[in-house]
Amino acid sequence: MIHAVRQTRTPIVLRTAPLLVALALLSGCATSGGGGGPSSSVADPAPPLQLDPQTVRVGGAPIAIAVDTESAWAAGPAARVGAGPIAIAVGEGGVWVASGSGTVQRIDPGIGKISGAPIPVADPTGIAAGGGGVWVTSRLRGTVTRIDPRSGRVTGRPIPVGRNPGDVAVGFGSVWVANTDAGTVSRLDARDGKPTGQVIKVGIAQVLALTVGREAVFVATTDLRKPGEVAVRRVDPRSGAVGDPLTGIPAGVPVDLAAGLGRVWITDVGSILPGGRRAGSVRPIDAPAQRLGRPVRVGRGPAGVAVGAGAVWTANAGDGTVTRVAVAR
């Protein structure tokens, strides 16, 4: 289903149509770019925030979300794009959806409809758009595939990276790939997809999520000896140096990161065991100060987060909702 939630000065209203989830922002508020590119801002110092969450039901189980200057797009198994959308990206002239059927499809953001034929990509896992390409990780194959957004075709051969690649982001002239089970980040040249030779060790065990801010790359890592906690590290995009971790962040899998509006934002799916009391939330991180903010309650089981149009957005798989957290400073 495509659920178009349009926000004006009046309360949210819901409109439905077939295919994906589109959240159109018609409030005329200032935009700040998406959560996964260099336009995202992690300011120094980060000012105090006023956060106003608003949750709307969209149905299905949205697990990923991306934002452009006009709309937020959420994807999940209920959407009829391929055999179950698993990742989504906005940029390079389209909305790009990776599905479990082994395809990537482009949606025309102007009309909200599929444009062009499905693009075959084996075992797509994560997706990002930027630097003149659309980049898709393949977890089982340990590769990244580059799609030419103009022709809608795969260019070149799949690019080997680390073990079990998942999250991917574009910024600083590079493509950054989280090699989940290797505890590393691979860096590719965004111009041609060639490896730069830089593989950065960032975690003891796993790299769960990755995002690019205006001044740095941020990764969420976990130590299997400390279940239920993650650490967030800052990676210098020039030197590859890894900063000290901000540790002890309560979170369950899945975890997602986005950078923007003066913070890094991390999802927490909340308690996953029966009787647990921790609600699903998104939490701001003041990266320069190495300080974790208070949780902002969102829908149940937030699986994806993005930043844009003056707000933080979460896709909440547990109850079929999307939360918009308006941010004022």
Image (cartoon, grey):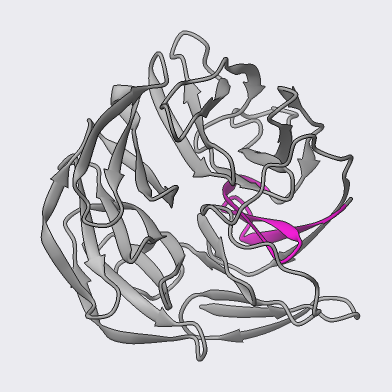
Which residue occupies the extreme bottom position in the image? 111
Q: Position of residue 325 (x, y in %)?
A: 78, 55
Residue 303's place in the image compared with 131, above or below, is: above
- Picture residue at 32% right of the left edge, 63% below the top: 134
Residue 79's place in the image compared with 18, above or below, is: above
Relative to 286, is 307 on the left or the right?
left
Q: Looking at this view, is 126 or 250 the one in front?
A: 126
Splitting the image into 4 quarters, where does residue 176 fall? top left
Q: Main secondary structure of the magenta part?
A: strand
The answer to whether residue 86 shows anywhere in this view is no
Q: Position of residue 311 (x, y in %)?
A: 74, 59
Whether residue 327 is in magenta: the answer is yes
- Picture residue at 42% right of the left edge, 21% below the top: 202
Q: Position of residue 169 (x, y in %)?
A: 42, 49
Relative to 324, is 108 on the left or the right?
left
- Picture residue at 48% right of the left edge, 20% below the top: 242
Whether residue 174 is in magenta: the answer is no
Residue 226's place in the image compared with 172, above or below, is: above
Q: Position of residue 295 (x, y in %)?
A: 78, 35
Q: Which residues are magenta?
A: 300-328
